[in-house]
Structure formats: C-alpha cells, structure tokens
Amino acid sequence: MARAALLCLLRHRTAAATSTSPLSTYRCLKTSNSKTPAAGVGRASFCRPFSSKAAVNDVIGMDFANTDSGVAVMEGKERLDPFSLVADELSVIASRLRSMVVVEVPNLASAAEYFFKIGVEGKRFRPTVLLLMATALNVHVPELPPAGVGDTLPTDLRTCQQRIAEITEMIHVASLLHDDVLDDADKRRGVGSLNAVTGNKLAVLAGDFLLSRACLALASLKNTEVVTLIATVVENLVTGETMQLTTASKQRFSMEYYMQKTYNKTASLLSNSCKSIAILAGHTAEVAMLAFEYGKNLGLAFQLIDDVLDFTGTSASLGKGSLSDIRHGIITAPILFAMEEFPQLRAVVDQGFDNPANVDIALEYLGKSSGIQRTKELAMKHANLAAAAIDSLPESDDEDVIRSRQALVDLTQRVITRNK
Amino acid sequence: MLFCRGFSRISTTPRKSLLGFILSRPTEPSQSLLSNQYLYSTIKVCGGRKAFSWSLPSLLGIGRQIHHSSSVIEEQFDPFSLVAEELSLVANRLRAMVVAEVPKLASAAEYFFKVGVEGKRFRPTVLLLMATALNVHLPEPAAASVGDTLTTDLRTRLQSIAEITEMIHVASLLHDDVLDDADKRRGIGSLNAVMGNKLAVLAGDFLLSRACVSLAALKNTEVVSLLATVVEHLVTGETMQMTTSSEQRCSMEYYMQKTYYKTASLISNSCKAIALLAGQTAEVAMLAFEYGKNLGLAFQLIDDVLDFTGTSASLGKGSLSDIRHGIVTAPILFAMEEFPQLHSVVYQGFDNPENIDIVLEYLGKSHGIQMTRELAMKHANLAAAAIDSLPESNDENVIKSRRALVDLTQRVITRNK
C-alpha cells in the first residue's frame, strides 16, 4: 500500500511539473523549503539547480527529510523505516555471522559469539547501511539464498556484498572487544563486557580470532582492492585508538586532531566498506568515491552526536554512563568548541579530570558556551554532505533503488536527531 | 683420493645416518667464508641408488679448504649466513614498516624489531632459503633486463612474506605475553612489563594490521587466506592451551594439534605461500608446506625437552617454565604412558611445587625425554625428505639452499638452546 502511495505521488508530481527544466526543479524545491526545518534547508542548498534530471527524485527526497511536511510520501504519514527495508536480509546475515564464528574450542566459541547472540547484536547500524547501499547502487535483492551457505564461496554479487557486511561487523566487534580491554570497561550493549565476564585474556584472543575470520572471509571475495580497503580500516582503527590513548597536550586541544581520530575510529569502517560495496558492484571510481563520502560523513555525524549525547543523554538510553568520555579524560567536540570560546578552560583540561571538581568546572563552561550547539551544527553539516553524496549517484528509475536511496538519506537525519 | 674415500664411506651407510653423519658436525658460525663458495656436495638419494656428484670446491682463497681437504664433506656451512644480507634488508624494511605516526605506538611496535632483539630470525631465514630453493633467485646486481625486473619483483614479494610472517609472529608474542603476565622475552623485559598491557595489546593489533595491509598489497587472495588462517590457528592454539580440560591435557593427540596451531602453522603456511607466489604447482606447494610443518613440530618438541634439560642462561627464560605454568608437554605425556600413576599427579595440577618434583622424578625414570627426541627426529627427517622430493635442479644456488634447509632440520634437533 505504501508503494502505491509512492507511485501516486510520483505521477502527481510529474504531471504537475510544467517542465523538467532545472529552474522549475529548483523552484519546486524552494517552495517546499520554507516549511522545512533546518535539516531541510541544509539539504536544499545541495540540490542540483542545473541538473537536467527529472524533479521526481529530489522531491521525494525532500519529503522524506521534511518531517513537518504535510506531503508525506506514505499516505499514513509513515516515515520509511530504513531498518525494516533490510530486516529480512539482516537476519540472514546475522545467522551466517553466528555460524562463521563457530570454532572447535568451546571457550573461544562462546567468547567470539558473545556479541552476535540474539539480543546483543547492537543496532546493526553498519550492516543496515551497507545493505541499503548495495541496493541503492542498482543491485536487486534476489531470492534470499537458503540457510547454511555460510561457508561456500559467494558467487553472486549480492552475497558478496552481504559478506562485506559480515566482515565489517566482525571487525567492528573485534575492535569493541579489544577497546573494552583497553578501557577496563565493564558494560557493553547493556550486558557485561566480555572482559568483565571471562577475563582480559579471552577477550584479547576472541578479538584476534574475529579479526582472522574477517580476513579469511575477505580473502574469499577474491578482490584485492577490497582486501586493501578493509585492511586499511583495521589499521585506521588501531591508529585511532592509539591517538586517543596517547595524545600529547597540544593535540588534545586540536579540532583537527580530534576529527582525524574520529575518522580513524568511527568513520573509516563505514566509508571504506561502503566503497567496497561499490567496487564489488563494478562501479566507476566516481561512484565508489560517492559511496565513500556517504559512509565517511555519516560516520562523522554519528560520532559528533554521540559526543553530544554523552553530555546530554541519560544512562538508561545510552546503555553506558553519560559523561563517560570526559571522565576518561577524552576531550570531544563540544569541549573543544567551548575551549575556543573560553580559553581559560584549557587550564582545566590540562589538569585532567581525575579530580571530579574539574569535570564540574568543564560542564559549567560548556553550559555557558555554544559548544553543544556548534557540535550539532557540525554534525548536521556532515549529515547533509552524506545525503548529497546519495543525491549525486547516477539516476535510476528502479523503485527499490529509489527507496534504498531514500532510506540512506533518511538515516542521515536519524543519525542527527536521535537522542540515544 | 678424496673422492674415493668419500665414495666408499658413503656407499656403506644407510641414508638416514648418512645425512646425520654429514650434518652432525658441530656448527661453527665462523665458517661464513665457506658458505659463500661453491663448497658443496650434492647427494641425491633415490630409492636404493646412491649417486654422488661433487662439485670441486672453488680455489678462490679458501685456505681452509685446501689444507683440510678431508673436511670438505664435513665442513658445514651456516644456513643463516646464506641469507644474512637479505635478512638485514628484510629487517630494515620491517623496522620501517612498523613506524607509526604516534610515537608511543611506534616504540611499542618496534620493540622487538630493534637490532639485538630480533630473535634468531629463524622463520625469515627458512622462508628466504625456501624462496631460493624453489628457483627464485636473488637478481644479479648488474642485470637490467625486464626478466630480471620480474625476478626482482618476485623476490621482493617473497621477502614481503618473510616480513609479514615476522610481524604476525611478534604480534602473537606481544599478545601472549599479556595473556601470560610474562615479564621477560628474548632476554629483555616483555613489552607489557615495560609499557603496560594496554599498549602491548594495541601494539599487537597494530602489527597485525600492518601485516594485513602488506598482505593486501601482494594482491594474491590465496596467500591472504593462508596467512589469515595462521592467525586463526595461533589464537586457537593459545586458547587450547589456556582452556584444556583435564582429559585433554593428557592427550598426545590434543597436544600435537595444539603444537601445530601454535608453532608449526605459521612456518608451514608461509612456506606454502612462498611456493604459491613463486608460481609453483600444488604438489610443490604441498612439499613446502610439509617441510615447514615438520620443521615446526620438531622445533617445538625439542623446545619442550630443553625446558626440562636446558639452563636459564641459554634459553633466555626460566627452565621448567612450562610445567610451572601447568602446561603439560610431550616428555610428560610420554612419561604418563609409561607410568599411569603420573596421571593423578597431573590432574592435581602444579600449583603445589611438590607435584613438580614428583613429576620430574617420574620423568627421570621414564623414557619421556628420549621418546620426545625421537619423535622430533622423525619430524625432522620428514622435513628433510620433503626437500629431497622437490623437483630436481642443477642450479648451484638452488642446491645450496636446499642443503641449508635440510641442514636446518638437523640443527633444530641438535641444538641445546
């Protein structure tokens, strides 16, 4: 039914447009703009006034982003749920993942699968993005393959791309396992961290194991460019973690250093795996770069909001204690912005945050400053860049493609409007 | 006369002890002079036939050669020196590869690549020798043709395998030391003791990631698979060691499996990778694999023996460290077969030092040490046999390298540290 509504709207819009000239496209968009929240305005500035493309795509995009608009695509004012678009496929991937981390040695098995068990897989954000990207790049979802094909060489493109999602998730969890060891964390995803439950040793081993399984899966794709990209991700993850662990004072105050670290720690995985999806599909370097840009900006936006939520969120919603960054002495974007406004904050930051009084002082300055606001704005800027990358993809009339691209754009908004 | 004498001596001895005879001479590292010359004998033993060919030693200033003619057969050249220069090249590249922008990580990562602490560099030696043994030569310096560029490239790629292998090996050492709370490694403080567990874990990850990137650069996904499998095996082996049930601890089969994972897999799969990159057939690749596997197993079995019989000074770590950590190795397993009453002692574990003394007593009474040495020799011979089964070559360098590989199988079992 939703699809029918979508089609209706398409036809309606196409008929209504007097011409498909760039100018009219722009005018259409501009009219809708006036009602849009800031997010919409940001997006409009990235539309293509000189594109000869039909207005259709852009209009639909605008409506999705425009939560206030009365012209929601779905008649029932239903926002398309990006996660539901790929829910079935995600289950298949999750099952395959669980079977991929099975190993003969029982202790290692339970350690490795710790975070793939049902209920603790996390939001599965990354696999969602990747599967949507795969469809968005013109590849249809075939009949889902029968269960139990986890070990066979993937022969068709979709399976290969699903494998990227699996690999990405394994690398991600491996890095979480090691990070928790490094941080002496005792909670993760609402349950005890693996190191808290089974000890550091098994956590380190399990992380190594997942990494090796990921490498094996990577090799099975037989695409050396993809292997290089994902290998780079692993390196970036480590570099990012190290940057965080060992910053000298000057670097801690540098926004540039912070953004580089954030790219390494968070965005690199998304950007390079998106790019891998495109490469596997045989796309041009330009398209691959657009996929990369989407992932990168999405990841950066995600992390910036994460930083904000660490100050403004609650324990219950985050699954981890709030203010955890600053308590660990990690200086994030809001504080960095605040320090620009209040240089005296530097002295406090320099002293470190072992003394809880310093945390209070920093929070006070933060409250007075526009640190939170500016971070949100920066996040929005990146979210819009991500959406723009999707908009720049080569046209397609395919409904699935269009829908997936919508969903990807929608995600950029969800990432910055979430409160947990 | 030399020939005759040599011939007659050789013709009467069965193959196994022939090799033992030829190669059992104590090694003298100072013989590097000889190693670079064509001081060599090829012994091809095919079935019952024994055919010998001697290449006359070069007379280029080998005084020792001329004056000690009888030692032509007995002179043993040093396998390590055959590849010494190349090893330096690899070592330098390794140091350059583990440079990181973040200073602390850099010093952590290069901790075990610094001059003086690179270890025996056993694995890279084996791999470089294997590369030559499989007909991939070091290019002549004066060469300028395309063919030689290809050779250079190929050789560089094979050197890359040696680097990657070493990075994976050191990464596993770093993580293992964290897991074992070890405070010494290679005669110096372990990295975790010096810089803390966190940096040690991170440095291990860093090395692994650098290995991944280098692997990717080889653009050969089969090789990527092989070495990824190695990492998995290392982890599995370590876990097997950490989490054995009592029953498994007493099982020789379990022990050999664990040993394969922890020690032999790296050498076997990287030897195989060398063969694959060199464009060899699957059969040759399998022979390379078998060499590495049996060499690794022999190495570990002797390591187990030395843990009982060696000294602190020579091992660089305390002796009896295995048993003190509750790790039951081959000598004990053999002893348990002879003296079933040892089972109950082993079951109890070794937190109580008295149990260690009891075990040592039984071990002394049993043939455990002897049987382990014999098992090691069996594997060493299997390794040598694999080399002998390689496709024939008349190339001197190939012959020399194969000789060196065989020599290594003997060194591994005759070493005392």
Image (cartoon, grey):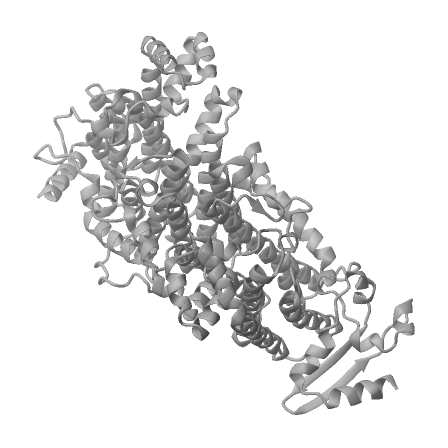
Position of the C terminus of chain B, as image quadrant, is: bottom right
Residue A41: image location, x then y, percent: 27, 22
The answer, for residue B116, to whether it is visible in the render is: yes
Please give left or right for residue A265 compared with residue B409 in the image.
left
Given residues B74 and A418, the one toward you in this image is: B74
Relative to A371, is B268 above or below?
A: below
Q: Residue at x 57, y 75 (%)?
A: B374
Q: Is residue B407 above or below residue A394?
A: below
Residue A232 is situated, as x and y percent measured from the top left of the image, at 48, 44
Query: Is B111 placed left or right of A41 in the picture?
Result: right
Residue B222 visible in the snapshot: no
**Rendered image quadrant of residue B364:** bottom right
Q: How many marks?
A: 0
- Residue, x 35% and y 30% (percent of image)? A303
Looking at the image, residue A180 sits to the left or right of residue B106; the answer is left
Examine the image and state in which quarter residue A21 appears. Answer: top left
Specify the quadrant that holds the N terminus of chain B.
Answer: bottom right
- The percent position of residue A253, horizontal first and vertical second, equals 47, 19
In the rendered image, which quarter is residue B148 located in?
A: bottom right
Q: Nearer the viewer, residue B188 or A325?
A: B188
Residue B408 in picture, x, y percent from top left? 66, 68
Give above or below for A301 relative to A83. Answer: above
Q: In the shown orientation, is residue A363 left or right of residue B194?
A: left
For residue A325, above or below residue A359 = below
